[in-house]
Amino acid sequence: MKKDSDQDLDLVEEAKKTLVGAKNWFLEDVELVKAYWHDKMGYTEAWIDANWHLVQDESEELVEDLDRREDAALLWLINHANNNPVPLEQCSVAGKEAQAGRYICMDCGHENTHPGGTLATCEVCHYGLMYYQGE
């Protein structure tokens, strides 16, 4: 009987040692991650400090470029989420200048005739997004 209790004590001791080792391994990993992010943020801050004049000089162009990319990404998302039959970037919006011709309403599908100039809403449903079909 004594042998079984000794074996149980050995298993408990091994489990304790394993848990202590796992804890130490985890804490070492956390320290490595903290050091990495500290170094990365330090590098980023140093780059910004050294190149601040570039950021200021080109900030308007960077913001415009970012806006263009965001607009393109939003159009892609809307086109694919809604399964639009016509990409929105090829559509015309009511109230804007548009060439004369036939326009299909993106809501009800009605064909509207437009003489040119400011595009009106759909004659049937008054929706304001149209697809140009030609003359």
Image (cartoon, rainbow, N blue to C red):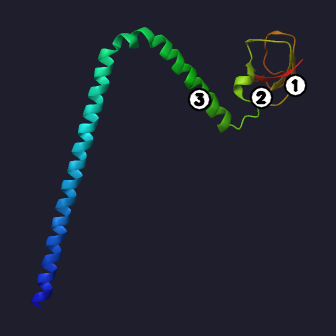
* Residue indicated by mark 2: 106
User: Is label 3 in a helix, a strand or a loop?
Assistant: helix
Looking at this rendering, what residue extends furthest in the left direction? 2
Of labels 3 and 1, earlier in sequence is 3
Q: Residues within 10 Å of mark 1 (few under 14, many from 20)?
A: some
* Residue indicated by mark 3: 73
User: Is label 2 in a helix, a strand or a loop?
Assistant: loop
Residue 111 marker: 1
| Foreground residue among 135 and 50 | 50
Q: Viewer-nearest of labels 2 and 3? A: 3
> Does residue 99 appear to the left or right of 12 in the view shown?
right
Q: CA distance from mark 3 to mark 1?
A: 29 Å
User: Is label 1 in a helix, a strand or a loop?
Assistant: strand
| Foreground residue among 42 and 13 | 42
Asked whether residue 128 appears in the rendered view, the answer is no
Of labels 2 and 1, earlier in sequence is 2
**Residue type, mark 2 in image:** Met
Q: Quadrant of residue 115?
A: top right
Screen quadrant of the N terminus: bottom left
Q: Residues within 10 Å of mark 3 (few under 14, many from 20)?
A: few
**Residue type, mark 1 in image:** Glu
The residue under the point 51% across, 21% down is 66
- Vertical placement of 108 versus 30: above or below? above
Screen quadrant of the C terminus: top right
> Does residue 1 appear to the left or right of 38 in the view shown?
left
Position of residue 109 measured from the top left corner of the image (x, y, whole percent): 83, 30
Position of residue 20 measured from the top left corner of the image (x, y, whole percent): 17, 60
Q: For the image shown, how many numbered marks are present on the structure?
A: 3
